[in-house]
Image: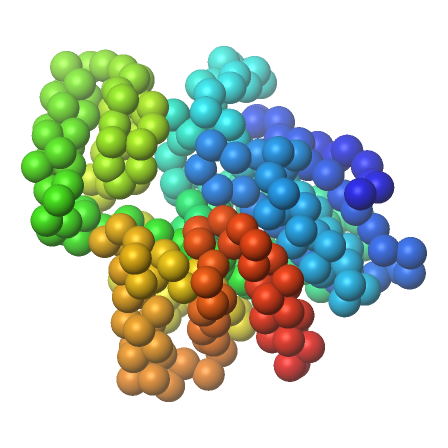
Amino acid sequence: MLGSLVDVQTEDGIKLHGFLTRTQSQSSWVWIIVHGVNGNFYGSTLLSDLALCVQRLGHDALLVNTRGHDLATFGSADYPARMGSMFETISDGQTDLLAWIRLCKQLGYANIGCIAHSLGAVKVSYALANSGIDHQRLDLQRFVALSPPRLNTELLSMDPAKREIFDQQLQEAQQWCDKGFPHHIMRVRFPLANWVSAETFMDKYGSGLKYDYFAWWTSIGVPTLWVFGQQEVRQGSVNFRDVDQQLEQVFRNQQALDHRLAVIPQADHSYRGQRDPLAESIQAWVQSF
């Protein structure tokens, strides 16, 4: 895939990189494509396939890093910054997204969409819904939330097989924060096996309903397509299980005309082997406007 490397600087001085790929025609549309936890703009075949998906519509694609890219990295601006998924705070995704949108406007795009995967979808949906950020400045016209997990402390603590492990991890993370060591690295096993700082674990998984999109999806003011793989909603962990059925019910109850739901048959969280049906679903939704 041909394109060019680009970079932005966020309002708080963090430099982020991305990759802009253009169609041959001059498109008025660009889609910002955002990675999930531990990811980046260049290492995911899912993200590159999503870029091809929007290119087939004649739109450009901008694959981007957030400050939570990769497991751990280092950012230097006016001050050193610990970055990567071990140290990220989800609300910081607002600042990252705003920087990328600003670049798209500088490049002359009239219409900006966003496709975000997994934790990236939580970051973008939270940014769109959060009342503390200026919706006009975000200025997205369409959003595809691809497999966002429910980050709900109570829900995670109800998992019958992992409840004890999760409670132990919460206690350990809180103890490290209380001792003044928020950046202490923990090896955690649930809801995702990973290495993460105590502060980040508490932010993602110990913040109650703060990052559970069921608590604030009604505040998302742009047309949104929610997409899940059939395997993750039928056989996945508690923060994915049957989420499609629950969303369908609340969309119906709220008469949410701007929100649509798609479940890709036989697909897992990464949509391996099912990228074509995924692309077709997204393209059909975009073309429906």
Provide residue 83's location: percent of width, then percent of height: 47, 23
Decide which of 268, 180 is in the foreground and name it: 268
Residue found at x 38% / y 59%: 231
Question: Where in the figure is residue 61, as x and y percent of width and height?
Answer: 73, 51
Is 72 situated above or below 227?
above
Tell me if I can see residue 70 in this picture: yes
**In the image, residue 27 above or below residue 34:** below
Q: Residue at x 70, y 32 (%)?
A: 7
Question: Which image quadrant: the N terminus?
Answer: top right
Seen at 14% across and 24% down, the residue is 172
Quarter containing the C terminus = bottom right
Q: Is residue 98 visible?
A: no
| Left or right for 32, reference 109 | left
Q: Position of residue 208 (x, y in %)?
A: 19, 48
Direction from residue 72 to residue 184 in the image, left or right = left
Q: Give the camera-side residue of 28 and 234.
A: 234
